[in-house]
Amino acid sequence: MKILGIETSCDETAAAVVEDGTRVLSSVIFSQIPLHVRTGGVVPEVAAREHVVKIVPVVEEALKKAGCGLEDIDAIAVTQGPGLLSSLVIGVSAASTLAAVLDKPLFPVNHIAGHIYANWLGEDSSDKIKFPVVVLTVSGGHNELVLMNKHASYKLIGETFDDAAGEAFDKVARLLGLGYPGGPQVSRVAFSGNARRFILPQAQMGKDSFNFSFSGLKTAVLNLEQKEYASTGSLSEEFIADCAASFQEAVCGVLTDKLLRAAEKFKAKEVHLAGGVSANKRLRAMAGEKVSGKHYFDHNGKKVELTSSFKLRFARDFSFCTDNAAMVAAAAYFENARHGTNRPVRKPKPGNLKSAGASRKKGNPNTAVLADPELRMYDIAR
Ligand code: ADP
Ligand code: MG
């Protein structure tokens, strides 16, 4: 089954053609980063206008690169939410229009489910992903631990109470004068820094909690930066590198400690990293070190025993970590394979835009959806 995926939840206009949820025939991503550098972050109105300009050429290019015409596409998938409403509506309108005109099914996808399914892209039949899987989804807008016992089943086991890790990376980069987007910049300068120079706080949110909080860590970096300014009048390259490395170590420490603890508790076979921050090499390496032995030492130096072994995975290609449309097509495939046309319909709540399946012909119940900036997808598994 060939699915055309469309993603416009934030500042990437993306389209992709994916076959059977794993084989990427094309993935085209138009990033607006250069446009948002000036403002040091995304201005929703500016992002939305750029999506309008780019959506048709990006879809056309994805079809061309896949060697497909629209007639070869079996279904359209689109990010319905969460995200910026004014950005989401561009992708949702384009996808709904295509589905209606072509009379093909339209699969609305939750953006976080998309990130999760990036790890299925390029899956090798000799190395299939085994459930249960615990996924750490970490990006600019999301920071969650999700348990999957089977395809298209998402149990939320932990989330952030304030900032997401990617947001903390972006804010710390701004404090250190490193530019936008912050994650790649912080990780670049951290490479030459001393991660042990500053011991920064890692909020545990209670002994057995799987929730996160990064606001205290961010404030600690702010205090360091202000102290350094007050005493030296500037930030040296060495200070910036050490600060970035210490910050990165603290974030990766708390993320991987909780990921592994959740994997133990829920008897996972695999642990996955997903979302923009999963591109971070230190995060990958630290998770790799922790899963490779029978025990590891957490950030507080406490020995944690592992009773089973876990396979660690992250996206096969860096471009599938940050926002892209191939992940959206993959999620749609596996969700449709599990639920088909009987998949749960999200009922509209007053004051909150929800999925609205407009029925046209038999067999294609969804040819229109509404964008939902606050879309959630989880059962609660605590
Ligand atoms: P969204 O939050 O819209 O879902 P993405 O999934 O594209 O966005 O993730 C973007 C986030 O990932 C940004 O906050 C960015 O700083 C962060 N990020 C990207 N690469 C890295 C990296 N190498 N290290 C840490 N953070 C990163
Ligand atoms: Mg994202």
Image: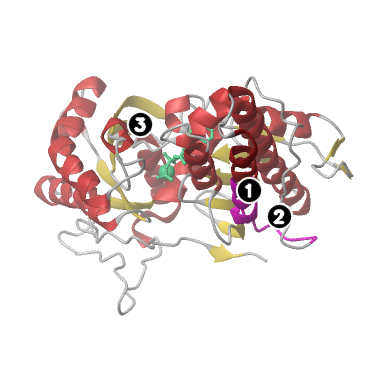
- Gap in angstroms between the C-alphas marked 2 and 3: 42 Å
Q: Is residue 353 magenta?
A: no
Residue span colored magenta: 207-223
Q: Where is residue 315 in the image (x, y as percent from the top left)?
A: 52, 30
Q: Which amino acid does label 1 sit on?
A: Asn
Q: Which amino acid does label 3 sit on?
A: Glu
Mark 1 residue crowding within 10 angstroms, few (<14) / some (14–19) / many (20+)? few
Residue tagged by mark 2?
203
- Give residue 55's mark: none
Q: Position of residue 117 (x, y in %)?
A: 47, 41
Q: What residue type is labelled 2?
A: Ala
- Give residue 223's mark: 1
Can residue 210 be seen?
A: yes
Q: Position of residue 60 (x, y in %)?
A: 16, 29
> Which callout, 2 or 3, points at the residue further toward the start of the chain?
3
Q: Is the residue 30 above or below the residue 75 in the image? A: above
Marks 3 & 1, CB-CB < 8 Å contact: no
- Gap in angstroms between the C-alphas marked 2 and 1: 17 Å
Q: Nearer the viewer, residue 64 or 253?
A: 253
Q: Is mark 3 on a helix, strand or loop?
A: strand
Q: Is mark 2 on a helix, strand or loop?
A: loop
Q: Position of residue 172 (x, y in %)?
A: 54, 41
Can residue 149 be seen?
A: no
Whether ligand 2 has any atom under 8 Å from the Cβ at mark 3 is answered as no
- Gap in angstroms between the C-alphas marked 3 and 1: 50 Å
Image quadrant occupied by the C terminus: bottom right
Residue tagged by mark 3?
19
